[in-house]
Image (cartoon, rainbow, N blue to C red):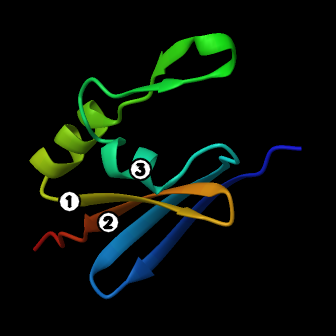
């Protein structure tokens, strides 16, 4: 059974969006490259899948925000910190 979660919270001037998904075959090496433009991962039977979040990172950072990735308990966590900008 796959676990998916989307969490949205306010934290010290930021809106934090966290996306969580099962990732039993991923490790820290994968996470260290997840934002690389041409990163691929070997899957069953030697097939390769492009899994880059480079475009996502580029767009988030162009808007002045931050994106992070981690692995916890065989789950991938993608966290985006959106800086709150109040209108006068």
Residue 20, horizontal then vertical, whole percent: 61, 55
Tell me how far mark 1 sits from mark 3, CA to CA. Answer: 24 Å
**Residue shown at the point (27%, 23%) measured from the top left:** 38
Labels 1 and 3: the sequence-earlier one: 3
Return the residue at label 3. 29
| Above or below, 10 relative to 34 | below
Badge 2 element: strand
* Label 3–label 2 contact, CB within 8 A: no
Labels 3 and 2: the sequence-earlier one: 3
Question: How many neighbours does mark 2 have within 10 angstroms: few (below 14), some (14-19), or many (20 or more)?
Answer: many
Task: Identify the disc placed on residue 26.
Answer: none
Front-most of 42 and 85? 42
Task: Identify the disc placed on residue 65.
Answer: 1
Return the residue at label 2. 81
* Residue farthest toward the bottom in the current orientation of the protein: 12
| Above or below, 87 relative to 29 | below
Residue 29, horizontal then vertical, whole percent: 41, 50
Question: How many neighbours does mark 3 have within 10 angstroms: few (below 14), some (14-19), or many (20 or more)?
Answer: few
| Above or below, 76 relative to 39 | below
């Amino acid at each position: 059974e796959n676990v998916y979660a989307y969490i949205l919270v306010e934290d010290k001037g930021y809106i934090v969006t966290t996306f969580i998904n099962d990732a039993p075959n991923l490790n820290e090496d994968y996470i260290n490259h997840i934002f690389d433009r041409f990163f691929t991962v070997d899957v069953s039977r030697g097939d390769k899948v492009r899994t880059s979040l480079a475009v996502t990172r580029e767009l988030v950072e162009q808007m002045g925000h931050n994106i992070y990735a981690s692995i916890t308990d065989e789950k991938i966590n993608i966290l985006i910190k959106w800086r709150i900008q109040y209108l006068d």
